[in-house]
Image (cartoon, rainbow, N blue to C red):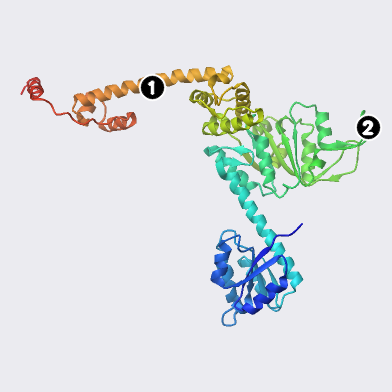
Amino acid sequence: MIEPTVQVCFLSQDSSFAGAIGHALGEGFSSRACDRQEAVRLAVNRTACDVIILDVRSTATKGEPESALQAVDEIRKIPLYPPIIVLMDANERRLLLQAMNRGAYDGVTAPPNIAELRLVLRRASKFHETLIELAKLRADSRSAGRLMGLRGTSAPMQEVFALAQKIGPCDVSVLITGETGTGKELLARAIHQMSSRSARPMIAFSCANLPESLIEDELFGHEKGAFTGALTSRCGRFEAANHGTLFLDEIGDLSLGLQPKLLRVLQERSVQRLGSNATIGVNIRQISATHCDLAKMVEQGRFREDLYYRLNVVQIQLPPLRERRDDIPLLAQYFLEGFSQQFGKKAKRFSLAAMHALEEYPWPGNVRELENAVQRAVALSDGHTLESWNFPSSIQRDSSRAELVGSYAQEVREFKKRLVLRTLRECGWQKAESARTLGMARGYLHRLINQLGIEELPAVPSSPRDQIVEAVLQGR
């Protein structure tokens, strides 16, 4: 594999020295001499500068090596600035510590060993590429309200995303709580992908509705002959997740008999297979999830308190879909596009009635139920638009009830508007007189006018006959 060319900016006042070093670096490196101002300009343009070499000897003023580090202070102000390699005399190792404290990447002594310099430059360049790629991934995860597989622009989900991004790189145990179907496993995978263990697997296992003996075998594994039917040895989920992440879903369903065994593994970081006395060390990050109230279960004696605190270092609560209705159009459109492509359908949008039905439905099954409903609708669709009748009858019934409530509210609004408008016209658009006629405060009338969207119509000049009639009626 051919390594890409490393663009080196040599910050030095000695152009002949910089040229000699650049020539000695040879193939795979492109070096150019520059002053401090040009180095800053090139650092901003990421394609023009991968690494900066700072020649302390030639850039220092008045023979003070520390003055050369002002360039480091200036360059580090640039977002994702290139790594800075300090080139200094052998007796200035103290200067390297100062430079690295200010933001330099590494240092080499002058005159440099070219083989060593090539290695340092290549390593610094790869480090910079990694930082840029990580920044892109983080930006992509935030854009359009996304965090890995999770989506949502509502305030509750943005709080979840922010907390997950904070604790993702920290190797702590996480407890994810929330109703069934809210996306707890997706959040666990997002946290795993943001951690230093992302190169290793995340092993998921659900503790729900399984016999205690089967869960124990799945988690800890067994040796050959440990029980009837154990014809071969098998490692458990803890061993499979070594140096990675173990995700235990529905941890609240774990029996009281297995809870102390799980606690021991988390404390000792070692497991024993069934039928064996040997201990096997495991290094895992524990992420658990449940729809139960574990704190209440602890009070009731159905969950060990010490295990609860071991699992609940950081807790993230996933909100139900009914509390983040602003995300329904975003999620529905995402599922629509995915299933249309999967099924080879033409559907690309929702009708107003269909979207209204989705937004009004309470979604007891949360995001998973929404996904299944859109999948069904796409499968039954024929055209480009999904209609309300493409969805299950339960969603249509909720929509019909919502429409009845909406029509009643609209009728009340229209009645208020007609009453206020008629009174304003009769009182010649005098707000104080209109408020007295309606029996309300003038400030409330002003708010009501704004809420109902009433605009004063321009006065129409009256005819002489109308003026006479009006004077008679007023007793003039």
Residue on which disc 2 sits:
231
Residue type marked 1? Gln
User: Which quadrant, please, contains the C terminus?
Assistant: top left
**Residue shown at the point (73%, 48%) measured from the top left:** 197
Q: Which quadrant would the N terminus be assigned to in this image?
A: bottom right
Pick the front one: 172 or 148: 148
Instruction: Please give the residue where the numbered disc 1 appears in the rendered image.
Output: 410
Q: Nearer the viewer, mark 2 or mark 1?
A: 1
Q: For the view shown, which residue lies furthest in the left direction?
A: 476
Q: Is residue 359 above or below residue 312?
A: above
Residue 6: give x, y in percent of width and height: 68, 63
| Figure check: 15 above or below 84 | below
Give coordinates of residue 250: x percent, y percent. Answer: 71, 32
Judge left or right: residue 49 versus residue 230.
left
Instruction: Tell me which corner region of the image, top left, top right, bottom left or bottom right, holds residue 48.
Output: bottom right
At horizontal 55% and vertical 34% (from top left) the residue drawn is 330
Whether residue 212 sits left or right of residue 165 in the image: it is right
Contact, CB < 8 Å: mark 2 with mark 1? no
